[in-house]
């Protein structure tokens, strides 16, 4: 994502921070996810707390698809 942001900033004559804000403004939580967020979801799904969860998609995207 960093490469995409830098490239778009260069093409549009904006700073990478402006492009980052443009993208994150579109998410419900106003941020991007990272590997820690995905790992937390995986850790939960592998735990006993998730033992009755079957056949569902778990979307970890900070609300990008909302």
Image (tube, rainbow, N blue to C red):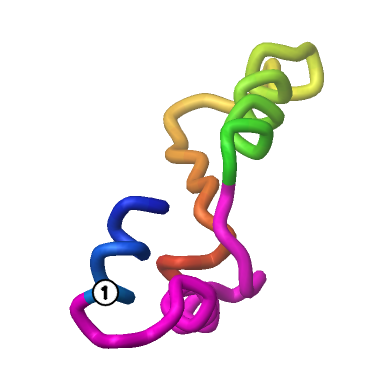
State whether residue 47 is above or below residue 24: above
Residue 56: % across, % down: 46, 36
The furthest residue to the right: 49
The magenta segment is 11-33
Give me the residue at 67% from left, 32% from top: 36
Closer to the camera, 23 or 4? Answer: 4
The residue carrying mark 1 is 10
Left or right position of 40 against 6: right
Left or right position of 6 against 12: right
State whether residue 10 is above or below residue 47: below
- Is residue 55 magenta-colored? no
Closer to the camera, 19 or 50? Answer: 19
State whether residue 44 is above or below residue 47: below
Residue 41: % across, % down: 64, 31
Q: Look at the numbered disc 1 and give the secondary structure of its residue.
A: helix
Residue 55: % across, % down: 43, 29
Circle count: 1
Give me the residue at 57% from left, 50% from top: 33
Task: Give residue 38's quadrant in the image.
Answer: top right
State whether residue 56 is above or below residue 17: above
Left or right position of 26 against 29: left
Residue 35: % across, % down: 58, 32
Give me the residue at 44% from left, 79% from top: 15
Q: How crowded is mark 1: few (under 14 residues within 10 Å), some or many (20 or more)?
A: few
- Is residue 17 magenta-colored? yes
Give me the residue at 54% from left, 66% from top: 63
Closer to the camera, 31 or 12? Answer: 12
């Amino acid at each position: 994502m960093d490469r995409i942001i830098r490239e778009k900033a260069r093409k549009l004559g904006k700073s990478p921070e402006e492009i980052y804000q443009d993208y994150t403004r579109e998410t419900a939580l106003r941020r991007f996810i990272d590997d820690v967020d995905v790992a937390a979801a995986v850790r939960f799904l592998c735990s006993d707390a998730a033992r009755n969860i079957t056949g569902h998609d778990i979307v970890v995207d900070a609300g990008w698809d909302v």
